[in-house]
Amino acid sequence: MRLIIAAAATACLASAAPAHAQSVSIQNPANFWSTLKAMGYELSPIAKADTTPEFDIKIEGFSSTLRLQGCTAGKDCKYMTLVASYSDVLNAPQDWIQQMNDEFDLLRVGTNEKGMLYMFGGYVVEGLPQKELKRIFDYWGADTAAIGQEATDKGYTTAE
């Protein structure tokens, strides 16, 4: 009898877990998008839904592009990437870019074909608790701000 009561209590507690304890899935991009929206993120509509779904997401006030990668016909995605570009940082010196890559070793920092500074990160998030996904986004936001501030401090920004 105690086992039945304990099992019932465990089931009740598990079903009453807070939303942030729920796990993340990127198998269905529309559901993942809805999860992020429910977590309070500002999102653009999903583009390229049939191939490599992507949308813009505002993290700590800075827009980034979130792409779901390794998908089959826009579903069953394997990982996500985040990309942020700095339109006011053009043609930053390569030695400084290398320094940023050394300091922010979980990110890739570079310049695109227009000379704009960008940062990129890839993340396997399937099955993570929502609070861990939020932690990834928090670090992304902090790193976005830190790299931008470093570029400003070094005088690499341009007036727009």
Image (cartoon, rainbow, N blue to C red):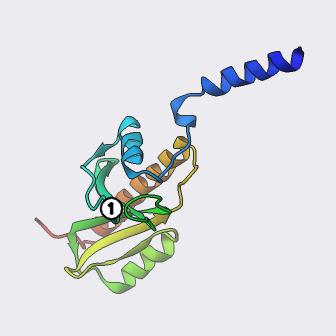
Badge 1: how crowded within 10 Å, few (<14), some, or many (20+)? some
Q: 17 or 134: nearer the eye?
A: 17
**In the image, farthest residue toward the front:** 73
Q: Position of residue 105 (x, y in %)?
A: 52, 71
Residue sitting at x 50%, y 76%:
102
* Quadrant of image for the C terminus: bottom left
User: Is 159 positioned to the left or the right of 141 in the image?
Assistant: left
**In the image, farthest residue toward the bottom:** 94
Residue behind mark 1? 149
Q: In this view, does 97 lie above or below 138?
A: below
Q: Is residue 13 above or below residue 157?
A: above
Q: Under tag 1, what secondary structure?
A: helix
Q: Position of residue 133 (x, y in %)?
A: 50, 48
Amino acid marked by disc 1: Gln
Residue sitting at x 22%, y 80%:
115
Q: 153 or 74: nearer the eye?
A: 74
User: Is 151 positioned to the left or the right of 69 in the image?
Assistant: left
* Quadrant of image for the N terminus: top right
Q: Where is residue 65 in the image (x, y as percent from the top left)?
A: 31, 60
Residue sitting at x 47%, y 53%:
26
Q: Where is residue 126 in the image (x, y as percent from the top left)?
A: 54, 54
Splitting the image into 4 quarters, where does residue 51 fall? bottom left
